[in-house]
Amino acid sequence: MNKFIILATLVAVAAAAEYTTPAYSAPAYPAPAYPAPAYPAPAYSKPAYEYEPMPYSFDWAVKDEPSYNDYSHQQSSDGKVVTGSYRVALPDGRTQIVTYKADEYGYVADVKYEGEAKYDEYKPAYKPAAYSAEPAYSKPAYPAEPAAYSEPTYPEPTYSKPAYSEPAYPKPAYPEPAYPKPAYPEPAYPKPAYSAYPKPAYPEPAYPKPAYPEPAYTKPAYPEPAYPKPAYPEPAYAKPAYAEPTYPSKPAY
């Protein structure tokens, strides 16, 4: 137990020695156009917990077969460069070995594996149930089909013809009105004397006859086409033999 506490303390000290506070350069902001206030410059003191890197070395290992824990780690530093490696037992039976180096240029690791991966065959812990043969269901006893009923034959009703006589309306005896013809005198319009105007004597225009000869068109000499008459007989459609409908006579209201 004391050895484990000492190793944990060495790891903490090594981690503190390995990682130092980075030194960032101050940002260069442009000078303001207004006069800056004259505050006294603060005096920063170096923190007491910052230590210079120092050499160290440690290693530890754990192997507990009941819990399948098997791993180890070793690391050393000369104050500037840190080197080390660790081993881890994987669940598939292999061992992973990582060798690393850390300096001012960064962290570089080399990973290797020892052994061959093995996977146990999966075996279910339960036993499947033994299914019995398919149950034989009895056919349900449906009620018998209904009897085939014959279509009822209702007698067709016979309606008696109504005995209404057609009403005879007397013709009205109104005398035809005689309207007297209005006695308006016919207007007498004077007839216009068109004959008083002399007829204009324009000479008829004399157009010269054109001197080109009249075209003489010849009749084309191709024979008229003779289309043969089709030799199939003309169809004779039989008259449908359905009975003529008999409509009821008009009722005598």
Image (cartoon, helix red, strand yellow):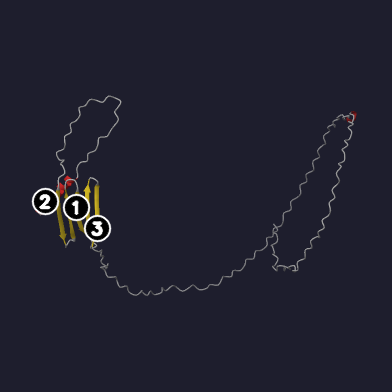
Q: Position of residue 108 (x, y in %)?
A: 24, 50
At horizontal 24% and vertical 52% (from top left) the residue drawn is 109
| Residue at mark 2 | 6
Binning the other alpha carbons within 10 Å of mark 2 as few (below 14), some (14 to 19) or many (20 upward) gives few
Binning the other alpha carbons within 10 Å of mark 1 as few (below 14), some (14 to 19) or many (20 upward) gives some
Q: Amino acid under label 3?
A: Lys
> Is mark 1 in CB contact (under 8 Å) with mark 2?
no
Q: Amino acid under label 2?
A: Ile
Between discs 1 and 3, the one toward the N terminus: 1
> Is mark 3 in CB contact (under 8 Å) with mark 2?
no
Binning the other alpha carbons within 10 Å of mark 3 as few (below 14), some (14 to 19) or many (20 upward) gives few
Q: Position of residue 75 (x, y in %)?
A: 17, 52
At horizontal 18% and vertical 59% (from top left) the residue drawn is 69
Q: Which mark is residue 16?
A: none
Please state, as top left, top right, bottom left or bottom right, where the N terminus lies in the image.
bottom left
Q: Quadrant of residue 115?
A: bottom left
In this rendering, would 166 be left or right of 90?
right
Q: Position of residue 165 (x, y in %)?
A: 71, 57
User: Marks 1 and 2, how far apart in space?
Assistant: 19 Å
In this rendering, would 31 be left or right of 136?
left
Q: Considering the numbered disc 1 on the image, is that residue within a helix, a strand or a loop?
A: strand
Task: Give above or below for 140 relative to 248.
Answer: below
Q: Considering the numbered disc 2 on the image, is that residue within a helix, a strand or a loop?
A: helix
At horizontal 20% and vertical 58% (from top left) the residue drawn is 88
| Residue at mark 3 | 112
In this rendering, would 222 be left or right of 141?
right
Q: Which mark is residue 84?
A: 1
47 or 184: nearer the viewer: 47
Between discs 1 and 2, the one toward the N terminus: 2
